[in-house]
Image (cartoon, rainbow, N blue to C red):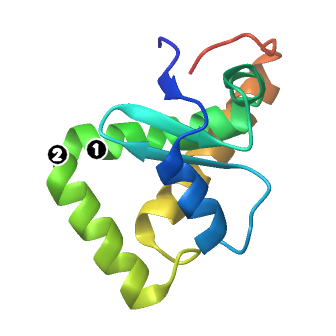
Amino acid sequence: MSQPRTLVNSPLARIARLVLGRAPRVAMVLGQTVHLSGATREEFLADAEWVAHEQVHLRQVRDLGRVRFLWEYLLESARVGYYQNKFEVEAREGARHHMLARAGSGASQSTQI
């Protein structure tokens, strides 16, 4: 799979950092772009688990469409909070499975998901 499109120093990701309690780094998917704050593109791409997490969100957007995904994500966050949001749970689980598969195959850091 190709590397995701990124936007570094995204003002929207900066706002998300503040909302999440001044998180040191944030990636968020808007449309088919990963918006970053607190990390460079290189730092993001070097973290296979982080990339895998955001790849799940990119797929969620493709499956649901931009507007529906955003609406459902925001409703879910309001209902159960960020950590228990079903989209975040799925992304964490997808990233975990990706990392287990990498460990089992002996894949190098440069392997794409």
**Label 2 sits on residue:** 65
Q: CA distance from mark 2 to mark 1?
A: 5 Å
- Left of 40 or right of it: where is 112? left
Location of residue 71 in the rendering, given as x and y in whole percent from the top left corner: 22, 67
Q: Quadrant of the C terminus?
A: top right
Q: Residue at x 74, y 25 (%)?
A: 102
Q: How many marks?
A: 2
- Left of 36 or right of it: where is 86? left
Q: Amino acid at mark 1?
A: Val
Question: In the current view of this chain or complex, which residue is farthest to the bottom?
Answer: 79
Q: Residues within 10 Å of mark 1 (few under 14, many from 20)?
A: some
Q: Is residue 105 above or below residue 14?
A: above
Viewer-proximal residue among 9 and 69: 9
Q: Is residue 17 above or below residue 85?
A: above
* Residue 111 found in image quarter: top right
Location of residue 26 in the rendering, given as x and y in whole percent from the top left corner: 65, 50
Tag 2 and tag 1, C-beta contact below 8 Å: yes
Viewer-proximal residue among 10 and 81: 10
Q: Residue at x 60, y 15 (%)?
A: 112
Location of residue 35 in the rendering, given as x and y in whole percent from the top left corner: 51, 39
* Residue 17 found in image quarter: bottom right
Task: Name the disc covering residue 61, or none.
Answer: 1
Location of residue 36 in the rendering, given as x and y in whole percent from the top left corner: 59, 39
Q: Residue at x 25, y 56 (%)?
A: 69
Question: In the current view of this chain or complex, which residue is farthest to the front?
Answer: 11
Mark 2, secondary structure of its residue: loop
Q: Residue at x 77, y 23 (%)?
A: 46
Mark 1, secondary structure of its residue: helix
